[in-house]
Image: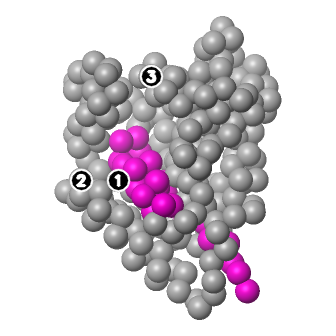
Amino acid sequence: MSKRIIIAIDGPAGAGKSTLAKRVAARMGFIYIDTGAMYRAVALWSRNLGVGWDDYHRLEQLAREAEIELTRDNRVLLNSEDVSEAIRAPEISQGASIVSAVPGVRRALVAKQQRMGETTSVVMEGRDIGTVVFPQAEVKVFLDASPEVRAERRVKDLKARGVEADFAEVYREMKQRDERDSTRPDSPLRQAPDAMYLDSSGMTESEVEEALLRIARERTSNGKEVQR
């Protein structure tokens, strides 16, 4: 009998969730779902339409109406348009953090995320995957790193994409985002009671990947074939 497996990776911005999720999904043949990209897509669409990030009612409408597709080659399509690069702009990153705190937006996107994980094995990363989206996930990891390391990673990532970035500014924005994510009333960032904690501060990408694969093997070694 085949069995679907859900791997949930939660943690703060810059902890390395996306990199880890992509690597593990590729190793295991699962679908990678970047939930943060979905909030970024809503933030981008609202900005393009001139909808303020404080217009909760309209934001919820956009979140419900948005057709968001995450492809196997890690592209993000919003209403059939490739927005993979546009959603990574620093302004949209900040907007996504603001938009994600809107309860109606979260409800709309959580419903979409749950549908994505209903038919196939997935590696899903975000802020509330193991606590709200898939509390029944077989494998849960809370990936963390020190604020300094996370800010350094974000600066490196931005510069690699040709975006000028100042460490002090990125660090300040990251601390603000941490505060918003952990104190919002709806689905705050927190570690699920049954999630394994991984601090990636002093680890290479390969080391973090192997650590998660070991956890996955331990949690799913029940002799059943995994449905991909």
Mark 2, residue position: 201
Task: Report if the CB atoms under discs 1 and 2 are less than 8 Å apart.
Answer: yes
Dot 2 alpha-carbon crowd within 10 angstroms: few under 14, some 14 to 19, many 20 or more: some
Name the mark on residue 144. Answer: 1
Placement of 128 over or under 182, stated as above or below: below
- Going by the numbered disc 2, the residue's amino acid type is Ser
Q: Helix, strand or loop at disc 3?
A: loop
Q: Residue 201's spot in the image, x, y percent?
A: 24, 53
- x 35%, y 32%: residue: 174
CA gap, disc 3 and disc 1: 23 Å
Which of the 4 quarters of the picture holds residue 107?
A: top right
Dot 1 alpha-carbon crowd within 10 angstroms: few under 14, some 14 to 19, many 20 or more: many
Q: Residue 60's spot in the image, x, y percent?
A: 75, 28
Q: Helix, strand or loop at disc 2?
A: loop
Mark 3, residue position: 89
Dot 3 alpha-carbon crowd within 10 angstroms: few under 14, some 14 to 19, many 20 or more: some
Placement of 165 over or under 48, stated as above or below: below
